[in-house]
Image (tube, rainbow, N blue to C red):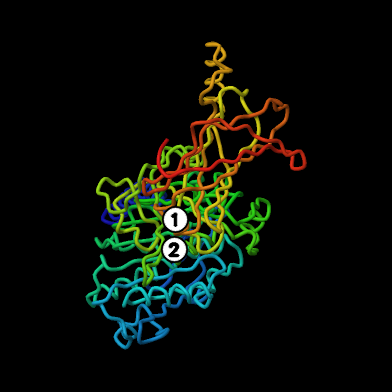
Amino acid sequence: MKSLALVVGFVGVTSAFAQLLTFDEPLMRMGAMLRNRIGRRTSDRRRKEICYDLVGCFPADSPLKKGPQSPTEVQTQFLLYTRNTSGDLMAYGDDRSSLSKSEFSPQRSTKFIVHGFKGSGKDKGAKLAIATLLRVEDCNVIMLDWEKGAAGPSYRSSAANTQLVGRQLALVLLDLISIGALPSSIHIIGFSLGAHIAGYAGRALLKRGIRLGRITGLDPASPLFREQFAATSMHSLNNQDAALVDVVHTDGAILWTEGFGLLKAIGHVDFFPNGGQDQPGCERVFASVLVSHLEGTVNSSTVCNHLRGFQLFIESMPKDEPSCQFRAWPCPTREHFRTGNCFPATCDVNSTDGSCGLMGYEADKGLARGPLYLVTRDAPPFCGDQLQATVTLSRAAPLPRGSVTLVLRHGSSSTAFRLHTEWVEAAAQQARQLVLGRRQQVGSGVTYKGLAAADYGSIPSSLGGLSAKIYFRPGVAASRDRLQLYYVRIATLDGHSWTFCGREKFFESNDQRDMAVASAELSLGFC
């Protein structure tokens, strides 16, 4: 009986255990599924991220985005320059050993220079920037040389490397701040892709509650940094990255194939010299720019507009003697600026109303914020006396169809203006005159305006008079009626003006040049 009981008991236990196993099978399957899922996530994470010592993890290569190269491949260098030393190598992650052995002084302000695509810390422009900064101020100048990472093998690769180099820069900044450097005294000057490196560094410090004093973006690169292409774009420099972010736009592109730079305002103050696109003295190129983006080929023709931002900044640094300043003013739109319709009565950089800004090195001294515009010369020195030309034709003539140019002569110099008019407004104005039967009456008709920069100091306020020639080149189906000049005015940013008015002058035809010409003598003051 005992044996039977034992057998029965064993069978019962075995049956219960079997039932328990049967009950746990779904749980076991769920556990296996969870383990597999966690394993896949870990595997996916490994595939989606690539991590490096000290600088952390980055998205790995994907069909839409490329990950940065390794620090070993990029070989970023930080070179310290002072008035007493030249090119001391500084490193991050060495427990501040190289920093302590250098001539870096936390009591001095610190300027970083960051080059762009295909650039190098050994370039003539980089060396000029270092020398000029040290001439202007007794400061620490640190050249961030990421030549290997900026070289490619493609633009896409170099753009991806900005994330890595930005974090490396942030680590160096943390070392400087840890020994007493004030974040407010740090100024990063980044050209092209270098502007976005500065932005990445600024954002990395913000996560630690530290805000840099200033970042200057010199024509920040556009391809792969345009927010409307969210799937492929990276973070661009923006006005959250430092206490002051000032940006100079010289090769802005509505379409990324048209230029190297961003056209959108991204800083606290954005300067658009000559409208921020086609710079005077540079050729217009389109197809070659596209090739440059994709293949990394660069020549002087394709980068002329892009480099102008860096050139303007270097020229803006203070001289020993009083010199020209890149004064800039607000405009409602880029088109208003192009047609000369928002030229201010005065532009005083010391005004407290924020109506006038300073582009370049001293941008922090101006109070103006938002998009600001200015006009420059077509060759060094680019800064000049900024002028507005206004030409009004007589209403006795029909609506002219063609181009109008004014050439101003002052002393041994001359300045050319390409003039524009609002055609819709001009046509409406003439229609009103025809309805009123006033077409042949004496008075003002269509008005043209334009901007130009004369040689600095060539038009002093004491100058009694100016000579101007106005050229009209007729367009297709233009009227053969003779045009009459009614009014001419040249105005400066200091509130001075020279005018011609009081008697109408006919344009004289020049058949050899297929244009008509009128001359005018302008007197100081208003009519």
Q: Residue 166 carries which label?
A: none
Residue appearing at x 59%, y 60% in the figure = 303
- Residue 367 lies, in percent from the top left, at 29, 51
Q: State the CA–CA distance, disc 1 to disc 2.
A: 8 Å
Percent x, y for residue 187?
34, 66
Contact? badges 1 and 2 (CB < 8 Å): yes
Left or right: where 344 falls relative to 212: right
> Is residue 259 something one can see in this rendering?
yes
Q: In which quarter of the image is the C terminus?
A: top left
Would residue 458 appear left or right of 152 to someone viewing this image? left
Earlier residue among tags 1 and 2:
1
- Along the viewing direction, whichever of 500 and 169 lies nearer the viewer: 500
Q: What element carries label 1?
A: strand
- x 45%, y 72%: residue: 129
Task: Find residue 313 and name its label.
Answer: 2
Q: Name the residue under label 1.
A: 248
> In the depicted view, which residue is nearer to us: 334 or 254?
334
Kind of residue at disc 1? Val
Q: How many marks?
A: 2
Report the residue at 52% width, 68% height from top.
69
Few, some or many residues within 10 Å of mark 1 (<14, 14–19, 20+):
many
Q: Position of residue 8 (x, y in %)?
A: 31, 50
Say above or below: 391 vs 294: above
**Residue 204, quarter of the rendered image:** bottom left
Crowding at label 2, few (<14), some or many (≥20) Cα neighbours within 10 Å?
some
